Image (cartoon, rainbow, N blue to C red):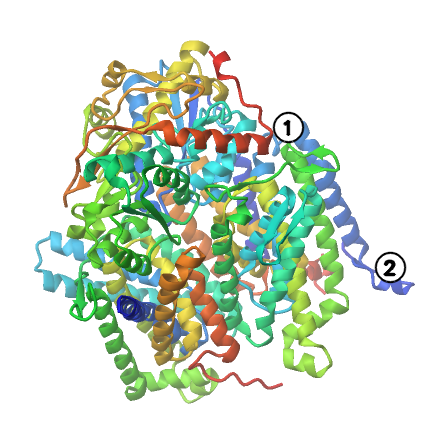
Amino acid sequence: MVLLGQFLEVLVGGLLAGVLYSLVALGFVLIFKASGVFNFAQGAMVLLAGLALVRSLDFLVARGFPLWSSIILALCFAGVIMAITAWLIERFVLGPLVNQDGLTLFMSTIGATFILEGASQMIFGSDVYPLRLFPTDAWFLFEGLFPGGILVNKLDVWGGFIAGILVAGLAVFFQRTKTGRALRAVADDHAAAQSVGIPISWIWFVVWLVAGLVALVAATVWGTKLGVQFSITFLALKALPVLIIGGFTSVPGAIVGGLIVGAGEKIAEVFLGPHIGGGIEYWFAYVLALAVLLVRPQGLFGERIIERI
Amino acid sequence: MLYREAGQFKTTYAADMAIFPIRQDRVALALLLAFAFVGVPLLSTYHIWPLGSDYLLRAILLPFLILALAAIGVNILVGYCGQISLGSGAFMAIGAYSAYKFGTGVHLPIAWLGTEISIAPLPVLASILLGGLMAAIVGILFGIPSLRIKGLYLAVATLAAQFFFDWVFLRVKWFTNYAPSGSVNAPDLNFFGVTFHTPIERYLLCLIFVTVFAFMAKNLVRGNLGRQWMAIRDMDIAAELMGIRPLYAKLTAFAVSSFIVGIAGALWAFVYLGSWEPLAFSIDRSLQLLFMVIIGGLGSILGSFLGAGFILILPIMLNLIPTELGVPLSTETITHLEFIIFGSIICYLLIKEPHGFARLWSIGKEKLRLWPFPY
Amino acid sequence: MVRNTLVLAAAVLTGAALATPAAAQGEQFIPILSYRTGAYAVNGVPYANGVADYYNLVNERDGGINGVKLLVEECETGYATDKGVECYERLKGKGPTGAAFINPLSTGITFALTEKTTTDKIPIITMGYGRADSKNGAVFMWNFPLLGTYWSAADIAIQHVAKELGGADKLKGKKISLLYHDSPYGKEPIPALQALAQKHGFEFTPIPVTHPGVEQKSQWLSIRQNKPDYVLVWGWGVMNGTAVKEAAAVAYPRDKMIGVWWSGAEPDVTPAGDQAVGYKALMLQHGAGKFKVHEEIQKHVHAKGKGLGKDDFGQVLYNRGVVNAMLGVEAIRKAQEKFGKKPLTGEQVRWGLENLNLTEARIKELGFEGVLKPVKISCTDHEGARDGRVQQWDGKAWKVISGWYTANQATTEPLVKDISAKYAAEKKITPRDCSKES
């Protein structure tokens, strides 16, 4: 019973932790889907969004604004910053690189990562800034059934909740709005989309903006979890296995991938880790991803890769 | 005017297939090698600028040579065979730790067979080469998924190797000879009875390795194997239809690449750092190598050198210039600026010349052929 | 494009030309290796500020050490070993006599530099970090792990646990876990803790956290199930704050957590807010707070607009920087007694370090009363002092909650002997005979 309780606790904790990775992975998916760019800068964008949010929030609160209005204003400010970033990246980095191969685009986003990391810390500071938007304590469920109960972190539940809303919102955006449809058209075929009059650079700006806003959402959750600081950029590396399990092009895939990675790595760490020395979750997620890829080379939900000569 | 091949007739097949068919290239290369092998040590011995102090030698030339070697290895895989790898750091680590184990003696008890493998400490040269060999074997192993996984998916999948080996060398105490902190020290650099201590000796040692492997790589990529790799890179299905076996071509690329990267890793650990921990071969190193290859030029040996030099030296320069000019900026600002400028230059170069310095070089050569006349 | 490249190349070349050291006469050069960016900047910045402010104080107030001005240059390592090595190579030869000593502020860089500093004859000061076996000056002639190694820290932590439990005999059968940063830094205390576990009969479990430590859920879920009586935290940077937060999430009592002195500063607890209340950490002698030396810094450095530490003035890591700089300066002063009042070489400063003897009176004179206890360094003991206290975070500030502990060398000394002898054998070093050193 104790073991079952612990297993359930780790499973639930892992699934929820996985959703938090999905929040970061979603940004990758959006950009890859629409422009074929593997955006390594997503982690840096989370940092930038978090710093913009927390610094403006602290500034407003210190000026005596009420908390709720400060939060809304700070979110707007961070949103504007992300919009500017999206425009700059589209205009100066990816616009000129249209039609280059994937590797070059990938490297250019690493270049962008350096710029974002340097600029965001230079403007907003490189200290650790606490952010408290969500409760971070825990519930203990089924205490009668299992000794000590099953621990569920409230922040993780909030994260899952937000991820759900985000995915639903993105689905509506992609399916129901004109811009969303244009986005899908561009994702299918740039040239064809352009020929029917879809302004392609505008669409790419929108995609980067949406990815920036997703980064902002991720920053609210992760900033509460860790405090906003440079280390947040390392989340990009935790999001990559999520991404390839789900497939680069699938929004629901990012969520499912997150669930698999989160549950898999936590269970491995807690139950397998002690026998082989611990600290295995980092590589375990990647090995899990590798195993999935061997069965499905495009990830679970990715578009089938069709090669022609 | 100077760079013109008119009048150089090739009268034999051997001459036609020479590694550097143009005389001026051969002369330039010979001069460069002469400078590297004779000039640099002389300047350094007599403390003539810019080698007055051994800063340039120890902090720039030494890492440059080793990373250039690693970049050649990565270029074989990424540039010639088209298999993107983010796990090069891990292969450097495998080279380094295997060389360390061979250099300090392998002692591996196999309990379930009731026996053990024991190898006495090997000479440094042998252990470095064996380090490369081990890296090649692991490279083949991690290359197998490339038969099924392609492109950026493969890139992320190679991260599995990166993180797995980071962990292995941290956790498995056998690899670090049970050092309590997990940090290990390289054995003496003793080659055939001569111990290499001074920076200049270390520099020459690396230079020999780099020269030998660069020539080998240059020869390999223009031969049968290299052409198979390039065919796979350009379109693997078409190559397969033409009778090139992807299994053989891809795995040889992984093996050769990992071998060279492994040697570079062993040199990095033994010659440059002297004492290291797995963090020295982290994902940052992998990304740095990939940068070198892409900025230098995919599918070019020369590009590997140019890229390595650029990526290594640029941040140091960016960091040095404000201090030397006496610009009153805090270290913090300088470093952030360094990041911004470095990132901008990377993006700028990728936009202006996505094929890297090697392409600029060949354009330059074409122009030189015509110079000073426009046509 | 070609032209652009040429411009770039020219810029790079000019940089190279400028990189030749500019000689300044009559000044003592001291390099600072710091990290103000990257994953560990949060902890690196206050420390570097403290170091820089104290050197500035010496220059501004006293006009240097006995008239020899200090020439200081900072180099950013980003906590990366290869950048640290590059910084060291860049700075070691500057000034008229080269670097007086080097202070890497990273265990990884310390390991990489240990051999290089031996050939370059530059002492390497690792105050409160570095390799624990380098306490043995007979083998590690150039390493000075001043004020405490991780093995001393482990012993002090266990002493405090024993005291809280009500005696060393109560340790028997207790469970103590070590949550550590998975790197040489985090692994250093393990041999000492294993030895202590054997001696006292407690159950010791090491739990690794992968760099940089942003994700610790599984570690803390294990701790929740395993219910150790104490958790020792050996973290750095983001790992510390995350550990405190995750502990709160699994409702592990924070007052049963004891951080090492690198896990007990303000940036480690502020992100966790109220959740950090009760969290304890070792003190490397000093804690937070403002002392007489701070007034001096305020008066001579900050008032002139040259101060770097603002928000972090008087914080734990800032103070550690100040203490660290002071010990270096005092070593140079000591060396000047023997070699004359002029810029000294690293070799001469090494003598000063090895013969450094800070008495209570001298510490008071320097304005460090209440910060430090007397330090006496000798050839056999490069650590000099192994005292520590324990502090607790009350939500606003660190409060000292214990008296002084002195690490018991009985358990760690055989380890020091053993491991340093191994190093000596590996590197073919003949240990010095300390009885012959003056």
Note whether A91 is above or below C271 in the view shown.
Answer: below
Q: Which residue is mark 2?
A: B7
Relative side of C284 to B230, left or right = left
Q: Which kind of residue does numbered mark 2 sit on?
A: Gly
Query: Compared with residue B118, is residue B254 higher up or lower down, i.e. above or below?
Result: below
* Residue A92 percent coordinates (x, y): 42, 65
Q: As drawn, is A205 to the left or to the right of C388? A: right
State left or right for residue A168 relative to residue C196: left
Residue, far right: B11
Q: Which residue is mark 1?
A: B47
Q: Chain of mark 2?
A: B
What secondary structure is found at the residue carrying circle 1? loop
At which x and y percent is residue C316? 25, 36
Q: Nearer the viewer, residue B198 or C259?
A: C259
Comparing A204 with A28, the one in front is A28
Residue in the picture at 49% in, 58% down: B346
Residue type beneath disc 1: His
